[in-house]
Image (tube, helix red, strand yellow):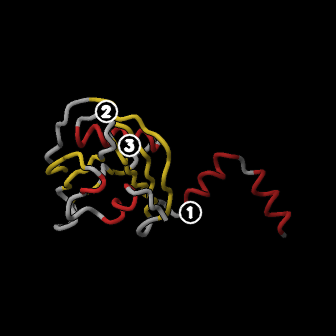
Amino acid sequence: MNDLVARLWRSIGGSVQWRLLWLSQAKFMVGVTGIVRDGDGRVLLLRHRLWPEGRQWGLPTGCAVKGETFQETVVREVREETGLKVRVGELVQLKSGYRLRVEVAYEAEFAGGTMKIDPKEILEARWFAPADLPEGTLESHRLLIFGKVD
């Protein structure tokens, strides 16, 4: 029976195989976070308008869109939320997150630009020394800043 199933699977071809896999597998959102640091080691934090009161400070983050790499997501999200340019570095976290969300985080380096926040999403953007993170910084982002990923 297993040989028959394997032969049938191989015979249907790649595009049909992919369609069947797409229909039968779970779908995930991918949340991508950038740990953006400047030349002095400070980290870029944003006070997010849509996040819960008391936990609004966090790293630049957003969802990957179809056709872009996760590194491109970091660059896009930082540019959209702050107007700044970054160079994406090392992958520091890849894990399954809340429900059907995959969490991805990259180190990134400030590469230039002038701060201009997107007021629809961001209330404030500032650089902080890791030892002086503001009250209300999301705990998972605090851990990323200090390299304590699980």
Pick the residue in front: 149 or 20.
Answer: 149
Secondary structure of the residue carrying numbered label 3: helix
Location of residue 4 in the rendering, given as x and y in whole percent from the top left corner: 84, 63
User: Which corner quadrant holds the N terminus?
Assistant: bottom right
Q: Residues within 10 Å of mark 1 (few under 14, many from 20)?
A: few
Q: Secondary structure at mark 2?
A: strand
Residue 71: x and y in percent read 44, 41
Left or right of 131? Residue 144 is: right
Three-letter amino acid code of the residue under disc 2? Lys
Above or below for 117 versus 148 = above
What kind of residue is marked 1? Gln
Can you say whether 29 is above or below 72 in the image? below
Q: Of circles 2 and 3, which is in front?
A: 2
Marking on residue 74? 3
Residue 1 visible to an observer of this rendering: yes
The alpha-carbon separation of the residues under discs 2 and 3 comes to: 10 Å
* Residue 13 placement, left or right of 76: right
Mark 2 or mark 3: whose residue is earlier in sequence = 3
> Which is nearer the N-term, disc 1 or disc 2?
1
Q: Which residue is mark 2?
A: 85
Residue drawn at (33%, 43%), measured in percent from left and top? 41
Q: Nearer the viewer, mark 1 or mark 2?
A: 2
- Residue in the picture at 29% in, 56% down: 131
- Are the residues at dot 2 and dot 3 in contact (C-beta closer than 8 Å)? no
Q: Judge the density around disc 2: few (<14), some (14-19), many (≥20) Cα neighbours within 10 Å.
A: many
Residue at coordinates 83% horizontally, 67% vertically from top-left?
2
Q: Quadrant of residue 74?
A: top left
Amino acid type at image mark 3: Val
Residue at coordinates 68% horizontally, 46% vertically from top-left? 14
Q: Which residue is mark 1?
A: 25
